Amino acid sequence: INLTRECVLSTALSPQTPAYDVSQACGTGLQAAFAVSNKIALGLIDSGIAGGVDTTSDAPLGIGDGLRKALLKLNNAKTNKDRLQALLSINPKDLIDAPQNGEPRTKLSMGEHQAITALEWAITREAQDEFTFNSHKNLARAYDEGFFDDLITPFKGLTRDNNLRPDIS
């Protein structure tokens, strides 16, 4: 699914409105804003809309090539017989290398990379906790004071960041 295109088509914008995606592990919204502002500065466009989407609840998982091919066969299967054949084509050896949520070169997760950064930069756990606490309190206050009222378009009933924990202590 082309999320950006679907976002355009779900608005009152003309269906001919150009849209494109920026794929980046983090900071997609900021990178999209840079792209739009650069096009405006260069005189290529008069105005634009930038946004970003990240998810921590459905992180991409890396799997081995054998399992990937079998799952693609399963996805393309038209009949139950084809589905069964695709499932039977899975080699048990391909299941030994469990799916991982790690960067392909280092095999480390984002959290593990963060732990290394915290050590190298001497950022204590207490400092991280304080930053997180203040971040949640600031976000809750911004919602309560109406800061986001004209910045957020509700989508399927969601009007606030669902990671916010305003009652954090």
Image (cartoon, rainbow, N blue to C red):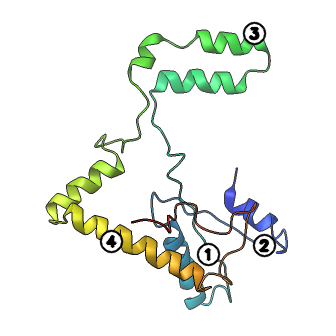
SS at badge 4: helix
Mark 2 Cα-neighbour bin, 10 Å: few <14, some 14–19, many ≥20: few
Q: Quadrant of residue 18?
A: bottom right
Q: How many discs mark residues in the rendered view?
A: 4
Identify the amino acid type marked 4: Phe
**Label 3 sits on what residue type?**
Lys
From the viewer's perspective, is the residue at label 1 or at label 2 nearer? 1
Question: Is residue 52 or residue 78 the one in the foreground?
Answer: 52
Q: Of 168 and 13, which appears nearest the observer?
A: 168
Q: Which residue is under mark 1?
A: 50
Which residue occupies 53% across, 48% down?
Answer: 57
In this view, the mark in front (1 or 4): 4
* Amino acid carrying mark 1 in the image: Ala
Label 1 to label 3: alpha-carbon separation = 46 Å
Q: Are marks 1 and 4 in contact (CB under 8 Å)?
A: no
Q: Nearer the viewer, mark 3 or mark 4?
A: 4
Q: Are marks 2 and 4 in contact (CB under 8 Å)?
A: no
> Looking at numbered disc 2 in the image, what kind of residue is underneath it?
Thr
Can you identify the residue that label 3 sits on? 81
Label 3 sits on a secondary structure element that is: helix
Tell me if residue 132 can be seen: yes
Q: Earlier in the sequence, mark 1 or mark 2?
A: 2
| Sequence-wise first label, 2 or 3 | 2
Of the pair 118 and 9, the residue shown nearer to us: 118
CA gap between label 2 and label 4 equals 40 Å
Q: Identify the residue at image location x=30%, y=65%.
A: 129
Q: Disc 2 designates what residue?
A: 17
